[in-house]
Amino acid sequence: MQLRSLTVQHFRNLAQQVVSLGEGLNVLVGENGQGKTNLVEAIHFLSTLRSFRTTSARDLLAHGQERGLVQGEVDSEGVSTRLKVILDRKGRYLWIGERSVRGIQEYLEILKVISFAPDDLNMIKGLPLLRRRFLDRAAFQFEAGYLRSLRDFSLALRSRNRLLKSNQVDVSQIESFSGTLSRCGSALTSQRAKLLKRLEATVHKSFGWMDAGQVGIELRFKPGWAAGDQMNPQLLAEELAKSLPQDQRFQTTRIGPQRDDFEILIDDRPARRFASQGQQRALTIALLLSLLEQITVEIGQRPILLLDDISSELDAAHRQRLFERIRQQGGQVLVTTTDQGLLDLLAGSSMQVWRVEAGRVSSW
């Protein structure tokens, strides 16, 4: 799978332009604030119709602009397809080739990307939100319908929480969201649990590549509701009803997949407490590499890998091992960095280097 070119108009601070990308390693070099992350975000948005930085698509429009565009030419199994998304203040509009599409399922099957940002390196010891965000981005790659479940659940959850915070609580209105929350919520928890099982099968090998050590690794899923391991919508509905008095007291929904989490254990000990910072970051990269392998096996193609400035957060040994592994795996990769020294580390690799300055991408 390859993204041959990317066209952007009025997206963040990026200048209106067409960027032709190489089929292997693409390195984007520039100072902070010049637009490197915005370019990676545009590719991620073209693939998933979501940003990894904001929940509001309106935030993606350049300041003062009412409409923007992201378009890409995708090669997949010898077939070339043009994807296009037009954004305005009211929403987004999708095209596959010259055909306007309303349903997103077909669209989301065409371009697969895996994105990784510096914040993700704090996943092991950081807030549960970071781990859920990783699970959501990963689970979507295996099941395009996951995105719809996540969207519907999130809308219902916000509405229920808004009612819980109101001065005059209408219990019947609160309960009206139970069906969506239980149906979509159990699906989310189920997909996240299945994903961890997939990754657990190979993460120890990936960690061996990153940390040059052989240890026992367990990925332990922690559902956000008591019967979460049974994946039964009716059980979640019953738990929501039982929890309602406490939810009213605390003015928020206290159970459900919005509380899902997972823990990594190394030799039966929690990595967040007993692993060094270097090991924690190596574990996070190992999860990424395992995810890349699993998706490649299941869809028969290697997704595009987007690495936003994470090399600067790794020590020299882990940085070298990461890029050695990337070279071995092949596929299209985009790496952003402020460090021109990274080019020396990658010397000998087949790569294209780009300079990003004031929102414009040019050859190095």
Image: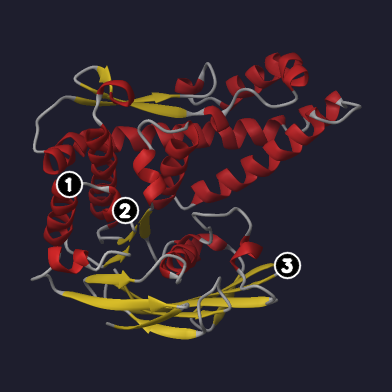
Query: Which element carries disc 1, helix, strand or loop?
Result: helix
| Image x and y of residue 309, in percent | 34, 58
Query: Which element carries disc 2, helix, strand or loop?
Result: loop
| Image x and y of residue 41, in percent | 46, 64
The front one of 270 and 148 is 270
For disc 2, the marked residue is 310
Q: Is residue 103 left or right of residue 180?
A: left
Q: Residues within 10 Å of mark 1 (few under 14, many from 20)?
A: many
Query: Which element carries disc 3, helix, strand or loop?
Result: loop
Q: Amino acid at mark 1?
A: His
Query: Which quarter of the figure has residue 62?
Result: bottom right
For disc 3, the marked residue is 90
Q: Residues within 10 Å of mark 2 (few under 14, many from 20)?
A: some
Compared to 238, does 179 lie above or below? below
| Residue at 47% over, 32% down | 127
For marks 3 and 1, give the one nearer the viewer: 1
Q: Residues within 10 Å of mark 3 (few under 14, many from 20)?
A: few
Q: Amino acid at mark 3?
A: Lys
| Residue at 71% over, 27% down | 252
Examine the rendering and report whether any part of residue 206 can be seen.
Answer: yes
The front one of 73 and 101 is 73
For disc 1, the marked residue is 318
Q: CA distance from mark 3 to mark 2?
A: 34 Å
Compared to 265, does 305 lie above or below? below
Evaluate if marks 3 and 2 touch, with contact meaning CB atoms under 8 Å apart: no
Q: Amino acid at mark 2?
A: Ile
First-in-chain label (3 vs 2): 3
Q: Residue furthest right?
A: 168
First-in-chain label (2 vs 1): 2
Q: Quadrant of the N terminus?
A: bottom left
Q: Quadrant of the C terminus?
A: bottom left
Q: CA distance from mark 3 to mark 1?
A: 44 Å
